[in-house]
Image (tube, rainbow, N blue to C red):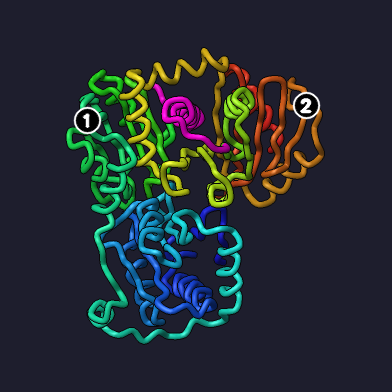
């Protein structure tokens, strides 16, 4: 079954994500594009470092080209934000990325990008899904030789890196960052981000920077603490000022300070928000998903900054960034977009912006993080992902829908159902929602101490029983 979740279609390779199903999705995308009857319709196609990603990308390139659609194809693996960037720069109608992002190695996926340089709006994806329903049987394609499509310029391989690097140099003060001689440790997690930072800051140290579709000792390429043991161990040697990690398609960011402490995405968001507003003098509203820290609400209220809150999924943030002047928008999972870039998550760009903050403010990452506690009081956070059966998921959501007045010993003040169930307590919150990309229930909690966070999570887990 082909289902588009919060970030495209993902499936297990050889079980769901097959060449046959990929043909269906690509053909549905072709049929959607043909609706406009626009001449010189074009698509940008890129792919990550996963098993068969290159082959899948080349296969759909043939489908688009054989239907008269111009294909700009990256000449090697590329990050998702690079594909989004080139979709906008080339004026293409759509961008496609073959990637399963942070999922385990058995998965692959198909992300759709809009012409504006960000996730395709939900209504655009729905039109592709509608075309998919109309395809009862995929025809047997008769492709011409690859070189024929390249020769007649229907398939146009291109270097995605060099123009992207040039663009970044106009947006981020790379010279200032280089002048500080930061000792930087970078973990691209065997993903599509490898090699890019080194083109901008040659003296960085990279680990996990080869093609390894099994992701080695990493369970899955998501830059969260349980997957960053090597990074933590190396940071604790005291040889580095900052540790940076990006996920499989390099749109998400994780960072570690010089003492080996993980600085979560809530704090990174706040550090960049404060810098853009207070130092760079940028203005605009702020957009956050329901899973992001309440520090954002407090800062926006204090500074009279309009604030939007959306369900989880950066596509909702990107939609707002297209409709409003958004200073910064992001989510708990390590992805954020800013007014100085395309409306897209970009782990590499945001890592460089964070380095610019450190260089400009002459503060370490730890000092920037500690500054938030002084301004807002302690905010501690954790997330637990639990694999569940469909029956368990339904039972849990039924229990939440009953509107409990207490979770454990904590009295519920308010319940928000924007995405799952978010329970508000005095100076704390708990969010329970099903994942849009995997068969998981995600439990999120924020409070003034880790002991309260853990109590809330433990109490929430009891609802599963």
Task: State whether residue 258 is above or below residue 101.
Answer: above
- Is residue 283 a member of the stretch shown in magenta? yes
Assign the N terminus to one quadrant of the image: bottom right
- Find the distance from the CA under tag 2 to the CA under tag 1: 49 Å
**Residue 237's spot in the image, x, y percent?**
25, 19
**Residue 216's spot in the image, x, y percent?**
31, 44
**Residue 332's spot in the image, x, y percent?**
53, 36
Q: Residue at x 35, y 66 (%)?
A: 57
Assign the C terminus to one quadrant of the image: top right
**Residue 89's spot in the image, x, y percent?**
36, 59
Foreground of the two, 106 or 330 = 330
Q: State which mark lies toward you, 2 or 1.
A: 1
Residue 436 shows in this picture: no
Magenta part of the chain? 260-285
Q: Residue at x 47, y 34 (%)?
A: 282
Foreground of the two, 178 or 239 = 178
Q: Residue at x 31, y 24 (%)?
A: 359
Task: State whether residue 132 is above or below residue 12.
Answer: below
Q: Which residue is mark 1?
A: 178
Mark 1: few/some/many CA within 10 Å (<14, 14-19, 20+): some
Give the SS element for disc 2: loop
> Left or right: 348 with respect to 32?
left
> Left or right: 183 with respect to 20?
left
Q: Which residue is mark 2?
A: 413
Quarter holding residue 420? top right
Farthest top residue?
Answer: 374
């Amino acid at each position: 079954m082909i289902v588009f979740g919060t970030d495209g279609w993902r499936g297990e390779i050889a079980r769901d994500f097959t060449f046959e199903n990929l043909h269906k999705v690509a053909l549905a995308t072709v049929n959607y594009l043909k609706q406009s009857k626009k001449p010189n319709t074009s698509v940008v196609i890129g792919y990550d470092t996963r098993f068969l990603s290159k082959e899948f990308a080349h296969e759909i390139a043939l489908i688009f080209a054989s239907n008269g659609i111009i294909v700009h194809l990256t000449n090697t693996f590329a990050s998702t934000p690079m594909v989004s960037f080139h979709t906008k720069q080339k004026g293409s109608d759509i961008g496609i990325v073959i990637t399963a992002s942070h999922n385990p190695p058995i998965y692959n996926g198909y992300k759709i990008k809009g012409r504006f340089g960000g996730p395709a709006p939900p209504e655009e994806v729905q039109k592709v899904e509608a075309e998919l329903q109309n395809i009862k049987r995929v025809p047997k394609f008769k492709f011409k030789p690859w070189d024929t499509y390249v020769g007649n310029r229907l398939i146009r391989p291109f270097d995605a890196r060099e123009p992207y690097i040039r663009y970044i140099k106009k947006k981020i003060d790379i010279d200032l960052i280089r002048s500080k001689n930061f000792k930087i440790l970078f973990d691209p997690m065997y993903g599509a981000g490898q090699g890019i930072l080194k083109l901008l800051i040659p003296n960085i140290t990279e680990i996990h920077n080869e093609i390894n579709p099994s992701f080695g000792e990493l369970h899955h390429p998501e830059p969260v603490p349980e997957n960053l043991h090597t990074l933590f161990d190396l940071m604790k040697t005291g040889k580095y000022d900052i540790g940076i990690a990006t996920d499989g398609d390099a749109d998400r960011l994780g960072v570690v300070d010089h003492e080996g402490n993980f600085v979560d995405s809530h704090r990174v968001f706040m550090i960049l928000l404060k810098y853009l507003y207070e130092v760079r003098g940028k203005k605009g509203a702020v957009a956050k998903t329901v899973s992001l820290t309440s520090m954002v609400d407090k800062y926006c209220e204090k500074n009279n900054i309009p604030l939007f809150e959306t369900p989880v999924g950066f596509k909702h943030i990107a939609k707002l960034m297209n409709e409003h002047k958004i200073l910064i928008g992001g989510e708990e999972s390590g992805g954020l977009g800013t007014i100085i870039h395309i409306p897209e998550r970009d782990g590499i760009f945001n890592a460089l912006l964070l380095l610019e903050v450190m260089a400009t403010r002459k503060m370490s990452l730890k000092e920037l993080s500690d500054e938030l506690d002084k301004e807002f009081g302690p905010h501690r956070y954790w997330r637990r992902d639990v694999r569940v059966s469909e029956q368990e998921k339904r039972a849990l959501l039924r229990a939440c829908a009953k509107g409990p007045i207490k979770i454990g010993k904590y009295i519920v003040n308010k319940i928000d159902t924007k995405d799952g169930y978010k329970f508000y307590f005095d100076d704390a919150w708990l969010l329970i929602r099903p994942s849009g990309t995997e068969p998981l229930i995600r439990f999120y909690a924020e409070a003034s101490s880790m002991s309260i966070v853990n109590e809330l999570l433990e109490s929430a887990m009891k609802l599963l029983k």
